[in-house]
Image: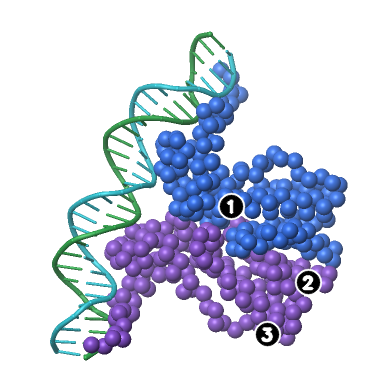
Chain colours: A purple, B blue, C cyan, D green
Amino acid sequence: MSATSSPARRTGGRSAAVLAAVRSAVEELVQERGTAQVTIPMVAERAGVNPTSIYRRWGDAASMINDLATYRISPDRALPDTGDLRADLAAWAQEIIEHFRQPAAAALLRGGAAAAGAGDSDCLRNRRAEATLLVERAGGGVPVDDVIDHVIAPIVYRVLFRPWSLEEDDLAAALVDRLFAGR
Amino acid sequence: MSATSSPARRTGGRSAAVLAAVRSAVEELVQERGTAQVTIPMVAERAGVNPTSIYRRWGDAASMINDLATYRISPDRALPDTGDLRADLAAWAQEIIEHFRQPAAAALLRGGAAAAGAGDSDCLRNRRAEATLLVERAGGGVPVDDVIDHVIAPIVYRVLFRPWSLEEDDLAAALVDRLFAGR
DNA sequence: ACGTAAACGCAATGATCTTTGCTTTAGGGA
DNA sequence: TCCCTAAAGCAAAGATCATTGCGTTTACGT
């Protein structure tokens, strides 16, 4: 007997196909109807999968959406590095704006906001870590909390409540301007 | 026949009592379970009201929660009026911060954020109207969008994702300072 | 290849949630 | 005060979601 026998999970083949189908279905439905209006039977039908399979794997819709949402984020991408903090922040903000112009990303942020109260799901923790990195690399000068308050927060507010206003093409620059005004 | 007969809505008595009971029940349940886990039969039982009454009035849970979230800050309250725009904005921001320190208010905002995607439900539209009033009364000088981006948005962000950071007692002043910096 | 069991599909069941027709209560104008 | 009807209550039917037992498929270790 091997005492170190792992539970022998299945990662490929049909299981992987189901996962992929479910992921696509969730992303589509979350865009079309919003996080709160997505049910498991709905996802199952769109994915061509039996509802029971989803119930057994995730338990409920919130867990499923949260699990699939975290997969979308790419924490390993390279950050802007021009040598100028102000330019770096502007480019970084622009990346984030473009990300949230995708309807699926915006919808998932809404779900994250709703879930943030109960539980420890903070889907923006990575953005804060990135801000810290940018500021510290430049030797400080701007508190990280100010970057959050005056660059990230306005973007998040617009994504949540005024999505059409994300299209203003000098938004990132304007936000960074105000952050640096009078310093 | 009087062509100018108004629809004759009922605003007082039993209707008002039902509204009050439902509001209390929603606020309690939203704190206890989170916006997404609140159902209409649940609210009806807690409020001592028939579920049908709620269905007929609001249609579904999301609309109900959003509606109650919108009107929780009385839209008719007096706004600060010191004669100085900067002081008025700081006092106004302070009111809003104190409002969202109540857990029920924070929970309702999360629900509003989740529902904001589909439809034009913006549970913060009253704040925008108030900002417009304050700015116009002072003869302009600060774009309303800037007030939203740099005063309201940071507050909302903190309510949603970093509720503990609402306790900093000079937050309102700091936000307004940055709004006016370099003008 | 082969065997084991993980994961899926199916179907029946139970638990909510939602809708609908009707009756009763009571707010507000005449 | 009286009348009209908006709004609430009640109860039954319908729809949808969630759970569970059982048989089938098939991924993975040997």
Q: Quadrant of the C terminus of chain B?
A: bottom right
Chain to which the residue tagged by mark 1 belongs: B
Secondary structure of the residue carrying tag 2 is helix
Local crowd size for mark 1, using a 10 Å CA cut-off: few (<14), some (14–19), many (≥20):
some
CA distance separating discs 1 and 3: 40 Å
CA distance separating discs 1 and 2: 33 Å
At 80% from the left and 57% from the top, the residue drawn is B142
Name the mark nearer the viewer: 1 or 2.
1
Q: Amino acid at mark 1?
A: Pro
| A4 up-or-down from A106: above or below | below
Are the residues flagged by discs 1 and 3 from a single subunit? no
| B139 up-or-down from A82: above or below | above
Indicate the position of residue A141 as horizontal and vertical percent values.
77, 77
Q: Amino acid at mark 2?
A: Phe
Residue B103, disc: 1
Where residue A174 sits, quadrant-wise, is bottom right
Q: Amino acid at mark 3?
A: Asp
At 78% from the left and 45% from the top, the residue drawn is B80
Choose the circle earlier in sequence order: 3 or 2: 3
Residue A180, disc: 2
Chain to which the residue tagged by mark 2 belongs: A
Where residue A5 sits, quadrant-wise, is bottom left
CB contact under 8 Å: marks 1 and 3: no
Q: Position of C2 compared to B88: left or right? A: left
Q: Inspect this view and state whether residue B120 appears.
A: no
| A118 up-or-down from A132: above or below | above
Secondary structure of the residue carrying tag 3 is loop
Q: Nearer the viewer, residue B50 or A27?
A: B50
CB contact under 8 Å: marks 3 and 2: no
Indicate the position of residue A104 as horizontal and vertical percent values.
50, 66
Q: Inspect this view and state whether residue B21 appears.
A: yes
